[in-house]
Amino acid sequence: MKRYTSLLPGNPPGGCTAETRNTHVNCSLVTQVVPEIYDPETDSTIALENARKHHNTFPRVYPVQTGKNAKDWKVALIGEASPNSLEKDANGKPILGRPLLSVARQYDPYTYTGKTYLLDVKAAKADSRRNTPAENYYQLVDQAKNAHNFGAGAQLWETDDKGHGVSQKIVLFGGDCGGTDADPVPETCARDLIETIDFQDSSPKYKQSNAKLYLPVQQNNTTVLPDGKVLISGGVVSGRGPWVNSCHLQLYDPQTDTIETLVDRKIAGHDHSTIALLPDGTVALLGGNATDLHGDEQHTDLGIAVAQLYMPPYFFKGGTRPEIKDAPEEISYHRRFNIQLSEGAGSIKSVALIAFGPITHNWDWGKRYVKLWFEQQKDKLLVQAPAFPGLAVPMHYMLFVVDDKGIPSVAKLIQLKGTPAS
């Protein structure tokens, strides 16, 4: 079944080429409404035709743990195309993946809502009618006030002494609700809004933060720091030109629900930039849209291609950094492991796994922060690994310890693997 060619009338039979792109629908953004499962062992995919949904162009997708067993997991998806921005069939039903013809050639011709779902991937895969188009296996959880399209996000997880979930929070920063150049008011939702949803709750609901972003933006980026705070970078205020940029770094503290404005880094970045936490605790900021950034009289170097390293505030607290002298290279689900610290490391406040993963187009899928339960005996820590892949998927992580002054260690590279307890 072909799903990668626009369904709009007049699209060239052979698909999209440089010659046809300007006279037909913007072919590079034909929306894929069918989720697929990739199997790396067989290098093959399985299409879930029975679980169609029209999400944002760059969707937010998060595995979450939904119970106390290894198989109790689903996939959270945030954002959905508004029916008002879709063509209708003869019965008046919205056609997924087909924008209104009046705006079909716009960059992203849809408006979006903040509807948030849990997708039961296992049930959809097991369905004998898996290849029959349908919109099944989605559970509506809640609706965010802002769709957070092209906005930043952060994943803040915490586990207990059994490795089970204490919290599974997703925090969303700014972004828009879609719209096109043809709309009278392209963006009507508050782009300085911060919202949080905790999938550990029995009935997850969005909570609006009392804190606001320094400027109302989209195309901003985030990374979670070793101390659990969230560093926010860049963004654009006016999304369709002339460009008005946000160049300040900001620091969000989820414990106090407050935000602090930091240094003006002179470069906004936008959707083609990236941000990455490095093992030594510094943050790399790279890339951006040079052609969009020229002409800002306040920031004349915006269009210069440059990489920057940022040192967060914990580098300037004073005192000696805790040091991980020894830790395993591999850890297993549900099991405990030891960390040996350098002599006289002092009191440790937190231990966390932080997943690797650069960002593009403001995605934050893989960059999960997982705060782990631990006990300390002098210079030795006994740490509980996550119990299930729904809390932390099997991969390599940076392992950080943070002392009672808020100063992090240099990370130890560690791999989470193994078969979780049933």
Image (cartoon, grey):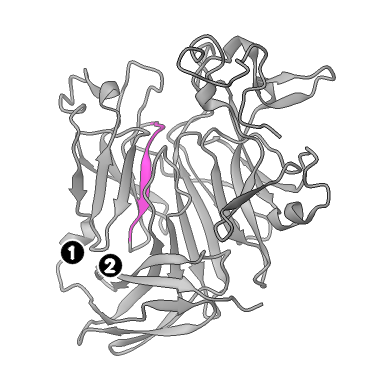
Q: Main secondary structure of the magenta part?
A: loop
Q: Which residues are magenta?
A: 216-225
Residue, far bottom: 377
Label 1 packing within 10 angstroms: few (<14), some (14-19), many (20+): few
Q: Locate residue 150 relative to residue 134 in the image: left or right.
A: left
Residue position for label 1: 317
Mark sitting on residue 406: 2
**Residue 51 locus on image (x, y percent):** 73, 43
Q: Locate residue 268 relative to residue 31 in the image: left or right.
A: left
Mark sitting on residue 176: none
Foreground residue among 393 and 368: 393
Q: Locate residue 153 relative to residue 36 in the image: left or right.
A: left
Q: Answer whether residue 228 is visible to the viewer in this image.
A: yes
Looking at the image, how many numbered discs can be counted on the residues?
2
**Residue 315 locus on image (x, y percent):** 18, 61
Q: Which SS class for mark 1?
A: loop
Q: Is residue 104 above or below residue 231?
A: above
Quadrant placement of the C terminus: bottom right
**CA gap, disc 2 to disc 1?**
8 Å
Quadrant placement of the N terminus: top right
Pointer 2 with pointer 1, Cβ within 8 A: yes
Q: Is residue 299 above or below residue 384?
A: above
